[in-house]
Image (cartoon, rainbow, N blue to C red):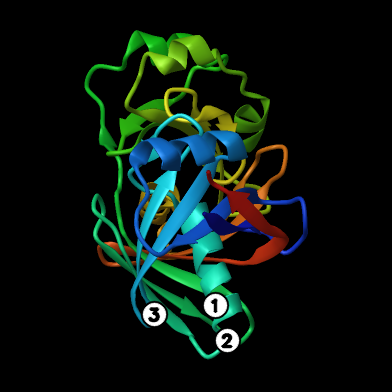
Amino acid sequence: MQLTIDIVDAFTSRQFGGNAAAVIELDAWLSDEVLLAIAAQNNLSETAYLRKRDKGVYDIRWFSPITEIDFCGHATLAASFTVFERQPSLSKLVLKTTAVGDFTIERQPNGDIVMDFPGRPPEEVRDVPPSLLSGLSIQPDAVLRSPQAYFAIYSDEQQVRALQTNSDELKRLAPYDVVATAPGTDYDFVSRYFWPANGGDEDPVTGSIHTGLAPYWAGRLGKTHLIAYQASHRGGELTCDVKGDRVQITGRCVLYSRGTVFLS
């Protein structure tokens, strides 16, 4: 069996920026073991698998190198980009998921891709896990939690940039990951994302967590249109629009490579 694989840099307009994802379209699902093995071999934050249901309608699943992921924003962006590139007549997609419902994806005339996601704002945490505090080199001002991650809230962007982590401690928070965030200087807010329990030490750009970050900062800053920056070594820009209980996240992609996976 031969499968076409695209490697796409997501949430960036320049090659080698943003977050790289692999995208593979399947006629039928392979076993979970094979899907995970391919993702592990790819060794990227995520590999997105698409299965076409109808024109413009696809099932989507995401795998990190170590497990299946319930929700991934940058690989959704990469997968949508791939479909739009191969089918230029399309300007709208519906991606169907098991864990977080269906997404509507639209390509704008300027090349921007707008993803409409359910908002997943964080809530206050009564008992902060000791492993969270021992896993962060700078103690946060506040801690919240969404269905995806603990939110370590800081008052200064430089604290987020300077933060160091102990992955062994943060692994103890499984199944939750950790996002550190603060108001930005050149952006409305900045963040970094750590997920040793589910993928790796630090994720370059994490679209999914902005479904929680955007509502949080919208409430803090009193605005619903926000420009965000994920301050990883690759870096990535995201435009977020909070619309009721939905969050629209806009980004761009750059194709890095296209190749073939040979399965025996």
The quarter holding residue 49 reads: bottom left
Q: CA separation, marks 3 and 1?
A: 9 Å
Residue at coordinates 72% horizontally, 43% vertically from top-left? 234
Which label is found at residue 56?
A: 3
Q: Look at the image and tell me whether residue 190 can be seen.
A: yes
Q: Which mark is residue 88?
A: 2
Q: What x and y, as percent, mark residue 122?
A: 30, 41
User: The residue tagged with tag 3: helix, strand or loop?
Assistant: loop
Tag 2: amino acid: Pro
Q: Which mark is residue 84?
A: 1
Mark 2–mark 3 CB contact (< 8 Å): no
Q: Residues within 10 Å of mark 1 (few under 14, many from 20)?
A: many
- Secondary structure beneath dot 1 equals helix
Q: Tell me which numbered mark, 3 or 1, is placed earlier along the sequence.
A: 3
Q: Circle 2: is it few (<14), some (14-19), or many (20+) Cα within 10 Å?
A: few
Q: CB atoms at circles 2 and 1 under 8 Å apart?
A: yes
Q: Position of residue 130 (x, y in %)?
A: 36, 9
| Residue type (three-letter) at the residue carrying disc 1 | Phe
Mark closer to the chain start, 2 or 3: 3
Decide: is 58 above or below 110: above
- The answer for how far apart the CA atoms under marks 2 and 1 are is 6 Å
Badge 2 marks a residue whose secondary structure is loop
Question: For the point 24% across and 53% down, which residue is it?
Answer: 98
Residue appearing at x 43%, y 39% in the figure = 34
Give the amino acid at mark 3: Gly
The reply, left or right, for residue 11 in relation to residue 98 is right
Residues at marks 3 and 1 touching, judged by CB atoms closer than 8 Å = no
Name the one closer to the observer, 20 or 132. 20
Q: Residue furthest front?
A: 264
